[in-house]
Each structure stands twice: as C-alpha cells, then as structure tokens.
Image: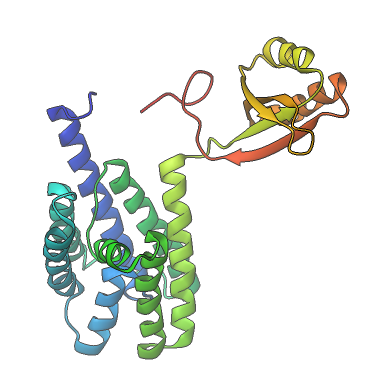
Amino acid sequence: MRIGSPSHTVFEYTLLIIGSLIMAASFNSFLNPNQIATGGVSGISTIVQHITNLNPAITQWALNIPIFLLALWLLGGQFGVKAAVGSVIFPLCVLLTSHLGVPTHNPLLAAVYGGMGVGLGLGIVFRGRGSTGGLGLAAQILHKYSGLSLGFSVAVFDGLVIISSALIFTPENALYGMIGLFVTTKTIDIVQLGFNYAKVAFIISDHTDAIRKAILYDLDRGLTELNGSGGFTGESRTVMMVVVKQNEVSRLKTLVQSVDPQAFVILSETNEVLGEGFKKHA
C-alpha cells in the first residue's frame, strides 16, 4: 500500500477510529469509574465529572477544539486534518461507549488494564500517523515558546493533571494515575516497536579480518566497518558494527572471544531493526 494513496489514507483513518474506540472503552470501563486520572484531557474530564457531574465527552470537546485552534494559530498548519478529526472523534467514542460495564473496582487493576487499553489505542492511532489532539498539542505550544523539551512539556501537563487528581480525589488515586500513565507509555512502545528487540554490537580488535570472517560466515550476519581512532594513541582503528537477534548474542560473544580474547566489545539494546534478516519496512 503506497503512502499517500487513497487506500492508505483510508487505512490510516480506520486506525484512528479503531484506536479511539479502544481508548474510549478503556477510559469508560476502567479509568473514569475508578476516578483514575492518568493525564491529558481525558484525565481532566474525569476530575470535572466528579465536581460537576458533566459528561466527560462534553469536557473533552470543550477543551480539544479550542486547543486545536490555538495550536493551528500559534504553530501553523503542520497538524493537518487528522489532528482535527482526532480531536472530535475521540470524545465521540467516549460518548458512544459511556454505558459500558465496569469489570473491576480494584483501583490497581483498573490502572493497569486501563493504562494498557489507552496505550494500545494510542499506539494504533500513532501507527496511522494520527493524533487525538488535547494536551499533546498544548505541550507542543509550550515547547515552542518556552524552550523546554517536548518530553518535559508533556510531563508538565500530565503532572498537573495528576497533582489535581490528588487534591480533588485522594493522593492514592494520584499514585494509581501515575501507574496507569507508566503502563500507557510502555504499551505504546510495544505497539509501535513490537517485541523484536535486538542488540547492536561494536567490536574493536587487532584481529579485524578474522572476526569479520567469523561474523559473516559462522554467524551468517552482515556488518559495517566504521573508521575510528584511539583517543589516547591517536592510531586509526576499525570499529565493526553488527546487529544481532537476542538469541544470537551468546554466539557472537563466543566467536569474538575465540578469535581475540582481548577484543573490546560494546553491546547495546535497540528497539527496532528494519532491513534484510530482520523486520521488513512497513
């Protein structure tokens, strides 16, 4: 499916709707009934409902639409139609799923399962290159005009919502909100990146040729050679970079050690690898 084609555009909007429905169902089944505010406009709507008994969908519309218009004015038209649609669709899904049952009144279970559901829905929305608007756009405004990092700007708004929930509900509710937010973040990562964790290894050795052959022919993996120089000696060195799957790490270390026990090896985790021998490009 070619990016930008009509079928791909329909696919992306379908993901936006499906993700919004999952988020809304999780919000109505787990988070809102247990007064757990995990941040964002949905967290604000939980607090507002407790104070005024106003339907959360109304609060979300009342906040999402002005925030989107403000972002459009201050940041330009970089968000496009999807952010506008997401700002309207998510509260609509909340309204449509408002009569779902409540599986549990255990706040810990509600925080975990609600966080997973919201993370799953958001991950699907992000896979479709969409947005549900809300405080994410507000964070981008703060980022642009304050110089704060985007991640910190998001944390500021989510933190204010969780602190407010501690004041309106109880400090314990706020702690459950933090658990839900953490679970949401981790679930988004899983949906976006999957479970295909791999390792990237950097190898420095005086026996480059022998290690190269071992990796290419014994391990059956490709590698890239980088030009480097010793920080102390200034001598030119070859740094070999190779990406391996989790179950190949031990074999790689054994091969390198068998060739050069003095080799310097750096192993680092990487969340996603696209290309031959790994995951295909989407």
| Visible residue check, residue 106 | no
Q: Is residue 233 left or right of residue 55?
A: right
Q: Position of residue 195 (x, y in %)?
A: 52, 39
In the rendered image, the vertical position of residue 74 relative to residue 214, given as above or below: below
Residue lying furthest front: 234
Q: For this rendering, which residue is in front, 161 or 50?
A: 161
Q: Residue at x 44, y 57 (%)?
A: 185
Q: Position of residue 232 (x, y in %)?
A: 78, 38
| Figure quadrant of residue 201 | top right
Q: Is residue 278 left or right of residue 26?
A: right
| Visible residue check, residue 184 | yes
In the rendered image, the vertical position of residue 251 relative to residue 151, given as above or below: above
Q: Residue at x 37, y 66 (%)?
A: 153
Q: Is residue 260 left or right of residue 132?
A: right
Q: Position of residue 50 (x, y in %)?
A: 27, 85
In the rendered image, the vertical position of residue 146 relative to residue 281, given as above or below: below
| Figure quadrant of residue 13 | top left
Identify the image quadrant of the N terminus.
top left
Q: Is residue 38 left or right of residue 135?
A: right
Q: Position of residue 111 (x, y in %)?
A: 44, 68
Q: For this rendering, which residue is in front, 50 or 236?
A: 236
Identify the image quadrant of the C terminus.
top left
In the rendered image, the vertical position of residue 153 relative to residue 2, given as above or below: below
Q: For this rendering, which residue is in front, 236 or 145?
A: 236
Colour style of the rendered protein structure: rainbow
Q: Residue at x 27, y 41 (%)?
A: 128
